[in-house]
Image: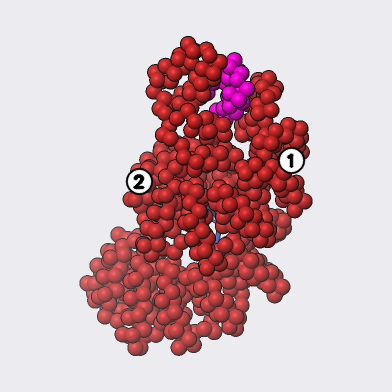
Amino acid sequence: MIRSGVMPDDHTYPFVLKGCSDFLQIHKGMEVHGVVFKFGFDRDVYVGNTLLMLYGNCGFFVDAIKVFDEMLERDVVSWNTVIGLCSVQGFYEESFRFFKEMVAVVPVIRPNLVTVVSVLPVCADSENMVMARIVHGYVLKVGLLGHLKVGNALVDVYGKCGSEKDSKKVFDEMEEISEVSWNAIITSFSFRGLYTDALDAFRSMIDAGMKPNSVTVSSMLPVLGELGLSKLGMEVHGFSLRTGIESDIFIANSLIDMYAKSGLSCAASIIFNKMGDRNIVSWNAMVANFAQNRHHFAAVELVRQMQAHGETPNNVTFTNVLPACARLGFLNVGKEIHARIIRVGYAFDLFVSNALTDMYSKCGHLSLARNVFSISVKDKVSYNILIIGYSQTTNSSESLNLFSEMRLSGMMPDIVSFIGIISACANLASIKQGKEIHGHLIRKLFHTHLFVANSLLDLYTKCGRIDLATKIFDRIQHKDVASWNTMILGYGMLGDLETAINLFEAMKEDGVEYDSVSFIAVLSACSHGGLIEKGNKYFKKMKDHNIEPTHMHYACMVDLLGRAGQLEEAADLIRGLSIKPDANIWGALLGACRIYGNVDLGHWAAEHLFELKPDHCGYYILLSNMYAEAERWDEAKRVRELMKSRGAKKNPGCSWVQIGDQVHAFLVGEKIESLDNGFWLAESD
DNA sequence: GCAGTCCAAG
C-alpha cells in the first residue's frame, strides 16, 4: 500500500493492529503503534481500542492499561475491553473499579450487555456477592434483564456466591430459558451441595422438553455420584454413548468420578483405560478412585505412573494421594510428598496442608501434624483434623483445648468437631464434660445426627452408663452398623453377654448388614462368657457374610479357646494361620497361659511377643511372673534381666480409666495389648 | 460475551 504510494489513514490502522493482535505479533504491533503515534492517529477511538486489544492479547497488561489511560476518547468497547483484560489477569478489584467508574463517571457511555456479562463472571470467580448485587441492580435499572445471556450469567453468579435462592429467583423470572440456563441452575444447586435439588432441576429440564447437552451431563454425573445413584448414573452413561458425547474429556472424567464415588471402582478403571487422551483431571479422578475405594497402594502407584506418562502432579493430586498414604501408614512416602509439595509451592494450599496434617495425624505423629497446622492457613477442617487426631491418643484433652481455640478464633464448630470432642471425652472417661457437650448438642439440634448419636453411644458405654446409651440407641431412627456394634461392645464390656448376643441377632432382623467389627464384638462377648460353641458358630458364620477374618478376629478366637482352657486348640489355631500372627494373637494366648499356668506355651507366645514388641515391658513381667509361680526362679530372673538389657520401660501405674480404655480399645480393634495384660500390668506394677 | 470434570475432617 505504502509502496504503491497510497498513505494509510486512521481507517487502515485498526485492521493492521487487529491482525497483529490476532497473531500475537507484538513487535510488528509496536512498530505500527509507533507510526500511529507519529501521525497522531492514536487519538482515534478505534485505533485506541485495537491497541488495547493488541497489548492485552499479547500479555502486555501494563502497556494496555497505559494505552487506556492515555486515550482521549473512549467508547463502550474500550471500557468493555479493559474490564475483560482485568478479568483475564485475575485483577478482580480493577474490573469492578472500571465498572463502577463506567456507571458513575461516564454519563454518556452506559454499560451494555457485553459489559454485564463480562463483569458477572468476575463476581462469580471472586465470589463477590456485594458486587453481584450492584451489577444486578444496574441490570434492573437499565432493563437488561430481558436478555437471555444476562439472566444466565445472573443465575450462575448467585450460585457461585452461595445463594441458590437468588439463582432460583432470577431463573423463575426469566422470560426465555435455554439449556445454558438449566445448566446454570443445576450447578448452582450442586455448588451448594444441594444434590437432590440439582437432580430435581435436571428432571424438570427433561420434563420441559429440553435436551441435556455435554455440559449438563458433566455437571450431573458428580451429583449422581454424591447421591450414590449409580443406576441413574449408568443411564446417563448410556445416554452419553447414544448421543456420542462420551468422548468429551469432561464427560469421561466425570464418569470416572461418578463410578468411583458409587464404589464401582472397576467401572471407573474401564473408562480410564479406554480414554484416548487424558488430562491431569483424569489422572486425579483415578487416584481418587483408588484412594476412596481402599486401593491405597494402587493410588500411590498411580501417581508414579502418571509422571511416567508426562503428567505433573498438582495440588489436587496431592490431596488425593495423601489420604492413601495415611491409611497405609506410609509415613516416609508421606514425608517425601511433603518435601515435594514444599518444592513446588503447594504448601500454602488449604486442601493440601489439611491433607498433610491429616496424614501425619493418622500416621500417629501428632507433633508433625501440629507443625503443619501451625504454619498453615486454617479453616474449620484443619481444626477438626487435629481434634479428631488427638481424640484418639492418650492426649485426648488436647482435643478440648483445640475446640476452645477454634471457637475463640471465630470458627463455628460443626458436627465433625463435636464428634471429635465427644470421642475425646469418651477416651478421658470424662462423663461430666461429655454430658455438658450432649446438652449443647441438643440445643443445636445436632443430637439426632446419626454419627453424633453413635459417638454419644460410645461415650456412655465407655463411661459405664449403658442405661443412657440404651436410651439414645432406642431413639435412633435408622441405626447403622456402627450404632449396633457400639452397643454390642458396650454390653460385652459390662459382662451382659446375653444382651450383647441378642443385640447381634436383632441387628440382622433390623436389616443391618454385619461388618468386620460386628463379629469382633460378638466373638469377644462369647469369649468373656466362655461360650465356645456360640463363638465357633459365629466365627464360621463370617464366611457367609464374605468377611475375611482379621488378626483381631483370630485374637478373639484364641482368647475364646484359651479362657476356656483349650490351650492346645488355641495353639493349633495359631499354627494353622495363613497370616503372620500379631501381638494381639500372641497376647491372647499368653494371657490364657497365665490363667492356666501353662508355662511352655506361655514361653512360646512370649518369645514371639518379645520379637514383635521388644520395648513392651508387660510381656516380660507376665512371663517372669509365670515362671515365678511355677517356682522356676532362674528362668524368672533371666526374663527380668532380658527386659532390663533391652531397655523396656515399666509403664506408669494404670488407673481404672486406662484399663477401661485398653479393654475398649481391644474390643474395637485398636492395636493395644489384650485384655488380661492390662489387668496384669496394673497388678504387677 | 453465559453453563461443565478431579481436592481435606466423621
Percent across and percent down for residue A456 are 56, 55
Magenta stretch contains residue A588: yes
Which quarter of the figure is the C terminus of chain A placed in? top left
Whether labels 2 and 1 share one chain: yes
Callout 2: chain: A
> For the point 41% across and 37% down, which residue is it?
A336
Q: Which colour style is shown?
A: by chain
The quarter of the picture where residue A600 lies is top right
From the viewer's perspective, tell me whether residue A94 is left or right of residue A579.
left
Q: Which chain is blue?
A: B
* Residues shaded magenta: A582-611
Badge number at residue A545: 1
Q: Which residue position is annotated with label 2?
A: A371
The quarter of the picture where residue A87 lies is bottom left
Figure colour of chain A: red
Task: Give above or below for A348 relative to A49.
Answer: above
The quarter of the picture where residue A652 lies is top left
From the viewer's perspective, tell me whether residue A52 is left or right of residue A678.
left
Percent across and percent down for residue A34 are 24, 67
